[in-house]
Image (cartoon, coloured by chain):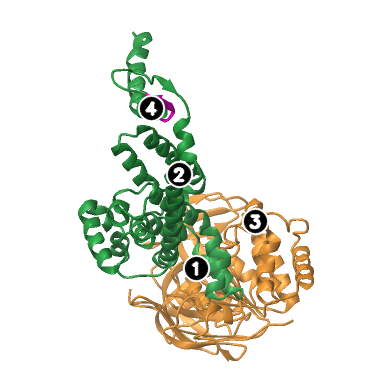
Amino acid sequence: MGGDSLSARAVVVEYGSVPVLKGVSIDIAPGEFVALLGSSGCGKTTLLRAVSGFVKVRSGSIHIAGRDVTSLPPERRDVAMVFQSYALWPHMTAAENLAYGLRIRKIPRAERDRRVAEVLEMLGLGGLGDRPVTQLSGGQRQRVALGRALAVNPRMLLLDEPLSNLDARIREVVRHEIKALQTRLGITAVHVTHDREEAMVMADRIAIMEAGGIAQLGTPEDIYLRPRSPFVADFMGASNVVPLTVGAAGDGHIRVEPGPDHDAAELPVSAGTGQPGVHLCASGPGTVRAHFRSEAVSLVPFGQDGPGGVLLRGRIAQASYPGGFYRYAVEVGARRFLVDDARRLSVGEAVGVAVPPSALHLYDAQPS
Amino acid sequence: MSALLWIPRGAVLGLAAFAVFSPLANLVLWAVAEKWYFPHTLPLEYGFAFWERVFAPRSNAMASLGTSVTIALFTVLACLAVSVPAGYALARLRLPWRGLILLAFLLPQAFPSVPVYINVARIFYAAGLNGTIAGVVLVHAVHGLVFSVWITTAAFAAVDRSLEEAARNIGAGPLRAFLTVTLPLAAPGVLASAIFVFLESLDEFTGTYFVGVPDVTTLPLLMFNAAMGGNYQIASITALILLVPSVGFMLVIERFLKADVLAKVGH
């Protein structure tokens, strides 16, 4: 089997005069699983629909397996899509839904029946072939939808939030099933989702989409540890922001100038993914925007030294117990951060927020 | 006090029942009356002699029933030929003036029918369509297109677009996707609209009168002539015959027209 490559070049899509995709380019290798991740309205579904041929591309080009499909109708693109609503045909049984694509390809009846039975078996739907799809559960429908796409032995699978209508518990299982199936069959897959964890778990590479463009494309690890812009950092959970003034210190270090809520510090700069140190994206010395994750920092009693890095002085403004640890809203100057800690502290207590170097992502301060 | 409420309730229900059923009862009485004249309240003699005359193989009634059904079937075909493509287009494509187009099909209903049909008759006369089945079918079709286009549009709009896209995605061309997915799913609504058109055509009088007379005699025209000639028995029996398909089909339509289709009518 195996998969096809996909290459989009400067794809522009407009609805009326509203630009939805503003020149998106992406290259996907055969057999690769790429997730398009973003919040609603970022253009991720539109990009998928442009690839499948359901929206007109204003300019740019789309190639599948080296073939220019930009102006081909959907039925001639040879991509199999799984719809968010499943889009199963209610006037057919599960088996008829699966057989539809084979019938169009004029596969002889015996071969068709064999293939349908095989797909039903592969997806754990044995014995449900004769059921009308309206009598299947949500999880079963989802499998039939996936089966309908897989029945025609596609070389490229397009998944449009296929898991968003499932229970959280089933979703976890199906995630791994789809990923395992895709790896085994070697199909190229493009998966649209707004669920960060889903993208992280399933994809080989993730494209974070923002306002009709790709903000960052990389491995899950890369995007998590080295978000290229404040938007990506924010989207990937590093949503606590503090302004810092930094200067060069030489030899792979930067110097954080003292501020009203913190002392001076000298921090190592990370050399690449997985290397310890500050993730430095700011272009030069001066005021920068520092992003960090709540779960990467810790609280230290007031006046004590932290484990290294930047120590922000603040006081606890709010406390809650989500289970297993305490979650505190810590007030530092005029800002509030959420910090998780195992110790029980009371509201109003002065604390230090210790941000280790590896938790810091520094970006140029934007005029805001 | 409340125990006596049944009196006004009973009176209102009784009046309503009288308003609905007394003309029908009168119709049934006339249909089985052999002899009935003033000042007698009820027929003097009952019998089925007139039924034999109506149902005689060579009778005018049977011939006009045949004409009526023929015209109704052709009207249905003519309407579907327009409303299936038009309904699909109105439901799916982003047409400019969509609302106006839908409204245009209502126009024939908006004007007083007699002057419209007189003018239609004049034009048809010039075109040689007066007194022909084709002419009557055309008149009925204009009338039926309202139901047909509006209901068919709603039926197609109720079919989820992604169902069609799924068919296209898996390799079906536009026509194949339409025939195997969209049309079967819209079929109940399309069938309901066809039944409406059939019934409308079967009952239509004014247009047939101006365009069809004297060469085309449908059942309503026969009934009119019989009633005008004082032959209430024949008129009543034809009226009862016309009632059968109406009631029967209405029961069928009620099953076919689902809430999701009705919700889309006129949208």
Q: Secondary structure at mark 4?
A: helix
Few, some or many residues within 10 Å of mark 2 (<14, 14–19, 20+)? few
How many residues crowd around disc 3 within 10 Å: few (fewer than 14), some, or many (20 or more)?
A: many
Work out whether residue B81 or residue B169 is closer to the camera in this orientation and state it.
B81
Specify whether residue A228 is in view. no
Q: Secondary structure at mark 2?
A: loop
Per the model, the C-alpha gap separating discs 2 and 1 is 106 Å
Question: Which residue matches tag 3?
Answer: A133
Tag 2–tag 3 contact (CB < 8 Å): no
Please give the chain letter of the residue carrying mark 1: A
Which chain does the numbered disc 4 sit on?
B
Q: Quadrant of residue A84?
A: bottom right
Q: Which residues are magenta?
A: B31-35
Q: Residue at left 78%, top 65%?
A: A117
> Is the residue under label 3 in contact with that under label 4 (CB below 8 Å)?
no
**Of A170 and B9, the residue lying toward us:** B9
The numbered mark at residue A311 is 1
Whether residue B92 appears in this view of the structure is yes
Q: Give the image location of residue B115, x and y in percent.
A: 20, 54
Q: Which chain is orange?
A: A
Nearer the viewer's eye, disc 1 or disc 3? 3
Give the Cα separation between the discs numbered 1 and 4.
Answer: 91 Å
Q: Are marks 1 and 3 on the same chain?
A: yes
Tell me the amino acid under the disc marked 1.
Leu
Numbered circle sitting on residue B21? 4
The residue type indicated by label 2 comes to: Ser
Magenta: predominant secondary structure element? strand
| Type of amino acid under label 3 | Val
Mark 2 or 3: the one toward you: 2
Would you name the residue on which mark 2 appears? B59
Q: Are marks 2 and 1 in contact (CB under 8 Å)?
A: no
Instruction: Give percent across and percent down for residue B110.
Output: 24, 53
